[in-house]
Amino acid sequence: MTGAAPAPLDFYFDFGSPYGYFAGLRIDGLAAQHGRSVLWRPILLGPIMAITGSRPNMDIPMRGDYLRHDAHRIARLLGCPFAWPESTPLNSLVPSRAVWWLRESDPVLAHRLARALHHAHWGEGRDITGIDAVAAVAAPLGIAPDALAGGVAQPRVKDRLRAETEGAIARGVFGAPYIIADGEPFWGWDRLDMLDHWLARGGW
Amino acid sequence: MTGAAPAPLDFYFDFGSPYGYFAGLRIDGLAAQHGRSVLWRPILLGPIMAITGSRPNMDIPMRGDYLRHDAHRIARLLGCPFAWPESTPLNSLVPSRAVWWLRESDPVLAHRLARALHHAHWGEGRDITGIDAVAAVAAPLGIAPDALAGGVAQPRVKDRLRAETEGAIARGVFGAPYIIADGEPFWGWDRLDMLDHWLARGGW
């Protein structure tokens, strides 16, 4: 007799954050080492920043410079593809909706699309703002552009992204990336080691 | 023939941040493992937040709740004394001036005072706002209350703290704790592992 599978980790991220990209490179493998799966939940930081009274970190004096320097430093450390996109911060509405639309019919493919969008934007520096740009990333995965364009325009899909962001706020998500594991919150790429430790010990 | 001693690490902190307390518990030992010393530089986050358009993290919706939860979680992990002070955020003007005043005549004792102030405020939850409270922490270290009170009131000492904060801003310090090692910046307690790695590798 086996128990029920443990709940997946909730991985909240905004496609516009390089730290979400770096976290995305590690989160699945980290979780798997503890027999856990991950639910990738793209959200919009805009409505969250309206509540916290913040603005994009890359627009904040001094902090923006640090963020750029830090992102390149982390990429060198990880040895991962990285290219600062020409246009930041990203409006991540369309790529986020694309993932939520695809989740309805194919969660595995939706996960692959999320990773591909991260790679395109932060690994290759490509713009992923508009539907054409998202479709160009999705096509190699076998996702038809017309279906994608129709999907992200559906009110149901727009509502889903809005509800996800509101649900995140209700759980205290004030920034991203933000991981919730068994109710325990971890904010930021730099807390993945602590998350790993938490899962190994079952909390402390 | 030996080369010149490497420059000390600059450890910028505001007494009002629990992350500065946690970083202070580790920074000296971490640096020593790489043959480095640390210059503890108390500064005021207030003027910095005026530039970045921020306010104390503990006053920000959701983030404040996370910070409290996180600080207790870190304290349990480290097994260190911790008590959330009754009155936060701290106005750290007087304790910061006290450290800079003492540095003029006795850098080693100034370092001990900084650690004692951290411990009193974050380890025991004591208020360290006023001169009497600071004197109570300083007295067991052999620092005479009258000398201390006279010292922190000197224009030269007030100017020093102001210059330190302005100097930090000029170096890009947008938050605290913030460590600069050989020109490389590390923001936050959660970057001490990266700092350790950086010192071990000599950068990357």
Image (cartoon, coloured by chain):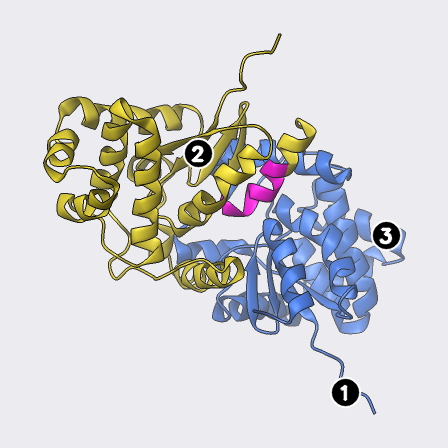
Chain colours: A blue, B yellow
- Residue B48 in magenta stretch: no
Determine if marks 2 and 3 fall on one subunit: no
- Tell me what residue is drawn at x 13 percent, y 26 percent: B154
Parent chain of label 1: A
Parent chain of label 3: A
A149 or B193: nearer the eye? Answer: B193
B142 over A167 or under it: above or below: above
A105 over A58 or under it: above or below: below
> Tag on residue A3?
1
Which residue position holds label 3? A139
Query: How far apart are labels 3 and 1 at the CA level?
Result: 39 Å
Residue stretch in magenta = B187-196
- Residue B194 in magenta stretch: yes
Answer whether labels 2 and 1 touch (C-beta < 8 Å): no
Answer whether labels 3 and 1 touch (C-beta < 8 Å): no
| The residue positioned farthest toward the top in the image shown | B1
Q: Relative to residue B50, is residue B23 drawn left or right? A: right
Parent chain of label 2: B
| The residue positioned farthest toward the bottom in the image shown | A1
The mark closer to the camera, 3 or 1, is 1
Q: Position of residue B66 (x, y in %)?
A: 45, 62
Res B104 quadrant in image = top left
Mark 1 neighbour class, 10 Å CA radius: few under 14, some 14 to 19, many 20 or more: few
Which residue position holds label 2? B11
